[in-house]
Amino acid sequence: MADDATPRRQGFGTRLAHMGRAPLRERGFVNPPLVRGSTVLYPSCEDRRATAKRRLEQVLMYGTHGGPTHFALEDAIAEIEGGTRCQIYSTGLAAVAVPLLAFLSAGDHLLMPDSVYGPARHLCDTLLRRYGVETTYYDPTLDEGGIAPLFRPNTRVLYLESPGSHTFEMQDVPALARAAHARGAKVLMDNTWGFHHFQPFAHGVDVSIQALTKYAVGHSDVLLGSATVATDADWETLRTASTTLGQYASPDDCWLALRGLRTLKVRMEAQEAAGLAVARWFAGQPQVKRVLHPALPGAPGHEIWKRDFTGAASLFGVVFQPRYSEADIFRMVDGLSLFGIGASWGGYESLALPTTNFITRTATSGDLGGPAVRFHIGLEEVEDLIADLAAGLQRLDAG
Ligand SMILES: *Cc1c(COP(=O)(O)O)cnc(C)c1O
């Protein structure tokens, strides 16, 4: 322990290696056991009643309330994000949907960034609208003064996602959160890109949402989500809605996410460095108009990223020169041998996804100045990825 009275906070890698496990309580095995179950038995009726009264705590009540494997993952995610309590969901999308249902009621108004994850927009435009919640989409780059006039007396939630899906706009989270809190609105944020590199609760967020499907799991084989809060009142709102809606995730999947967390730091560091190397390479190619990577100096939102984030995901956009057609872009991407064509990200393998004519924008133009492709960089060697991409750029010009 250091000389000053406060113990030194251990490094992230150290904490990842030790969180959520107690080997000597588990008969010596390094990892916590995988516990499956629906029914939980009690020694007496009185004991069962007493447990039910503590439903907001991590108590064993019934399978849907979670068990030891869920609790270990809940604790790990809450610690990583700097919150107090965490609810695990079966997908990232469920982790978006349930907090919105928890904090909104019929007659309420919701502010959504125009760059929000597409299925979240679909939820607002369909189910939430049908249930009487009105959504206004806003330019994600608005500042505190710019967003102020969009609040109405019934605005209950300001939703954030930084950087935005596909277009990578950075949001000034502390300023936007100030504007929301001054008007009594809750701040919900999709923090999947930032993950441990952005501490939501230190920047004014009330509910932090994660698609654990991405880097936490890290191997493209499990879907999982989480929502984390920092106050007892927010926990009661979130937890009550989650159990009311029967939200649950398989303990097998939670166990795999816990396993993924042990290597999260080294995977993310390697992927961050590789992602930046590929992004920098793209920025120097004549076929490229601009690169949408917040950690790249000069890129849109870089100053906010530098101020608020300690690192970056390996997911970014590349905007090609407007002379290329969609057919040119498809020819380039189809011929890549190391990049899969598909949704999701955060796994060990690289992906490429053309985004032009695929994203919806209503509050901003969404015109990036040319056709765009979203790249996810995995754990392959950077030189191999760049060789594959260089051949792809040649195909662009061969059309
Ligand atoms: C993937 C993703 C989600 C949804 O996660 P799933 O587990 O695929 O449902 C939510 N938000 C963002 C930003 C994502 O990229």
Image (cartoon, rainbow, N blue to C red):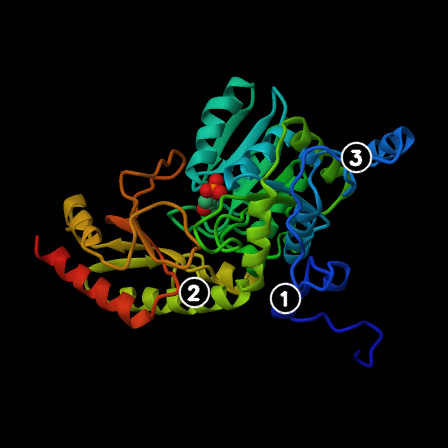
Q: Please give the name of the residue rendered at 38% of the width and 39% of the height, measured from the top-left corner.
A: 364
Q: Can you say whether 244 is above or below 211 in the image?
A: above
Label 2: how many Cα within 10 Å (few below 14, some 14–19, many 20+): many
Q: Determine which residue is flagged by label 2.
A: 271
Residue closest to the eye, 88 or 320: 88
- Precedes in sequence: disc 3 or disc 1: 1
- Disc 3 marks a residue whose amino acid type is Leu
The verdict on label 3 being within 8 Å of ligand 1 is no
Left or right of 225? Residue 380 is left
Label 1: how many Cα within 10 Å (few below 14, some 14–19, many 20+): some
- Disc 1 marks a residue whose amino acid type is Ala
The answer to whether residue 209 is visible is: no
Q: Which mark is residue 368?
A: none
Tags 2 and 1 touching, CB below 8 Å: no
Q: Quadrant of the N terminus?
A: bottom right
The verdict on label 1 being within 8 Å of ligand 1 is no
The answer to whether residue 351 is visible is: yes
Q: Determine which residue is flagged by label 3.
A: 41
Residue closest to the eye, 217 or 153: 217
Q: Quadrant of residue 276?
A: bottom left
Q: Quadrant of residue 53?
A: top right
Q: Which mark is residue 17?
A: 1
- Precedes in sequence: disc 2 or disc 3: 3
Q: CA distance from mark 2 to mark 3?
A: 45 Å
Q: Please give the name of the residue rendered at 61% of the width and 20% of the height, measured from the top-left corner.
A: 106
Left or right of 374? Residue 261 is right
Residue 239 at x, y percent in the picture: 70, 35
- Disc 2 marks a residue whose amino acid type is Gln
Residue closest to the eye, 34 or 250: 34
Tags 2 and 3 touching, CB below 8 Å: no
Q: CA distance from mark 3 to mark 1?
A: 32 Å
